[in-house]
Amino acid sequence: MDLRDAELLTDEAHAQLRLVEASARHAEVVGVYLADMEPGANGPEPTHFREAFRRTGPSNYAHGKQAEL
Amino acid sequence: MYAYNDFDAAFVAERNRQFRAQVERRIDGSLTEDEFKPLRLMNGLYLQLHAYMLRVAIPYGTLNSAQMRQLAYIADRWDKGYGHFTTRQNIQYNWPQLRDVPDMLDALAEVEMHAIQTSGNTIRNVTADHFAGAAADEIADPRPVAELLRQWSTDHPEFQFLPRKFKIAVTGSPNDRAVTAAHDVAIRITEREGEIGYAVLVGGGLGRTPMIGKVINEFVPQEDLLPYVEAIVSVWNLLGRRDNKYKARIKITVHEHGIDEIRRLVEARFAETKPAFNGADLDLFETIKAHFTAPSFTNRPVSAYTRAYDNDPVFRAWADTNLSDHQAEGYAIAQISLKAHGETPGDATADQMRVMADIAQEFGHDELRISHEQNVILPHVHKDDLPVIHARLKSHGLATANIGLVSDIIACPGMDYCALATARSIPIAQEIATRFDELKIEHEIGDLKIKISGCINACGHHHVGHIGILGLDRAGVENYQITLGGDHTETAALGDRTGPGFSAEDIVPAIERIVDAYLDHRDSAEETFLQAYRRLGMAPFKTALYGEKADKRSEAA
Ligand code: HEM
Ligand code: SF4
């Protein structure tokens, strides 16, 4: 589960299709949605701080994904 | 305090058994998230940004030491070793695994606790003054009333699918420490010619349309309370705007129909509910009251206290800010601040919970309280034990002397945890507290309440903060709006917006400028921030924030 390996979708229709597919995997994931990303040196980067935080974890403790890296 | 009877224990056990089966079906894939969501919400299980979150009710904020120890055990065993106490007298666990939640609920049931109706469109955890049963200014203990309301509202068949959430708060003292005016229903115990009754307010609430509750009845006699509250909820249950969740709270219903019309409808409904109550509620109330008799206080000298107070400046500073007057001679109410400078407001580690539990058991008649201000209270401690208590608290990072001061900040979880957030709150609180600690002026500033929310839902009560901070998302950047002059007490008021908001980097200096302006303009050290604001108005603070051209600039904004 590394964002470096993530695929950046650029076609809206394709993205919608992938969203439908992901939503169907309800035993693995919850609350699936499309997030805006842009390409970066280490793979796609979130453009909004909300997803940036979700990618790392809370700022008050080193918990969440930042603890697993 | 209240102890479960067989019915209560069986009810909670059955709910937990049902939920365990629901979780199993979710994990094996037979329930989708959409199907599971209403079931988990009935049991206080939310989904946040990084994980599930379990919200556990602490009815009227009262805990005994065994319960506090169990909260610590749960934090260690199934979470990350801490818990977050909230403005509605709940504790939230931020990192539970779904498969563990049924075990957590069973562990809670062992100490007569649960997470039922901590979520969803139901009557939520009934909150009360955290000084209940101890405060010197109290007319009567609000907790029996809160417990009666809890038993009546829990699983009440008519009120499981209300238009929206419904929050009730009770105070037994004219000094309102329970923010009752910001609740859907406020119950204020009053006395009229020697008879106890209740002033009832309706339609208060914060969130996107903040409103101060309005008096619907100056005096509801004791024997009419449940039928009267039932009449209020049932009138709103029919009138409430189910078409629009932003207009569904009773504050909007009261606003749209007017308090006089609501009062008339409630009276009419009361004429029907009253005869349906056959007096069983009054018998129950008497039974409940017997659970809340005061501890047996002892009368002994306070010489150790006086010695420490006179000789130890650290103890004295703590005693001056963290103690309040108790009903019994020689006793005090001691507040344990969960706002150590730079730490997360309202968080306690499992070790700290155990320390507080031990102190309550040894010195505090086995009682603890959680305040809406996210602190913990020892409601009944003898003053002579305070030096020992203070020393023990100090060795566990629990002796911060800042109750009611600028660093005693209420902050909601904000974007660090909450899925609804538009900005972070916790780091802002941490930075403000750290900054004023460096400046060493918080005791000089005196009584000043800062309250921070990470979105317009206002879980951090920012509207009623002397200084309120609201975190917003302005074009993909965190932006913080300031309000001044809010008041959460019996003289409740909503704060006024200063003008354009500030970035995350600029918000702490902006708060500092406001505080400096107050120190410059106050007429004496006795004039509090709120008093100064009321006398001076917005102008000097606006100038401090935006410069001399303040008025022009904020008009353009
Ligand atoms: C995942 C976490 C949370 C979620 C999803 C959440 C959601 C909400 C929402 C949607 C509202 C607005 C309701 C309305 O006006 O109709 C609200 C209000 C409120 N919440 Fe929360 N909240 C969360 C955490 C908290 C926490 C941690 C606290 C205490 C620190 C809290 C205390 C309150 C209070 C006091 C209000 C305002 C009272 C009122 O609505 O009148 N909530 N919350
Ligand atoms: S105020 Fe907003 S950000 Fe803060 S806890 Fe409530 S819903 Fe979440």
Image (cartoon, helix red, strand yellow):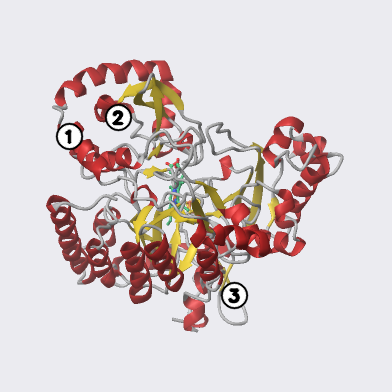
**Residue B59 appearing in the image:** yes
Q: Position of residue B90 (x, y in %)?
A: 39, 54
B114 shown above or below A3: above
The quarter of the picture where the C terminus of chain B appears is: top right
Under circle 2, the secondary element is helix
Q: Residue furthest right?
A: B548
Residue type, mark 2 in image:
Val
Q: CA distance from mark 3 to mark 1?
A: 69 Å
Q: What residue sits right under mark 3 in the picture?
A: A39
- Distance Cα–Cα, label 3 vs label 2: 57 Å
Tell which of B406 and B131 is nearer to you: B131
Q: Which residue is mark 2?
A: B229
Q: Nearer the viewer, mark 2 or mark 1?
A: 1
Labels 3, 2: one chain = no
- Of B536 and B130, nearer the camera is B130
User: What residue does disc 1 label?
Assistant: B283
Would residue B94 appear left or right of B22 to someone viewing this image? right
Label 3 or label 1, whichever lies nearer to me, is 1
Q: Residues within 10 Å of mark 1 (few under 14, many from 20)?
A: few
Q: Under tag 1, what secondary structure?
A: helix
Answer with left or right where residue B142 lies relative to residue B415: left
Q: Viewer-nearest of labels 3 and 2?
A: 2
Horizontal side of B501 relative to A36 (left or right) equals: right
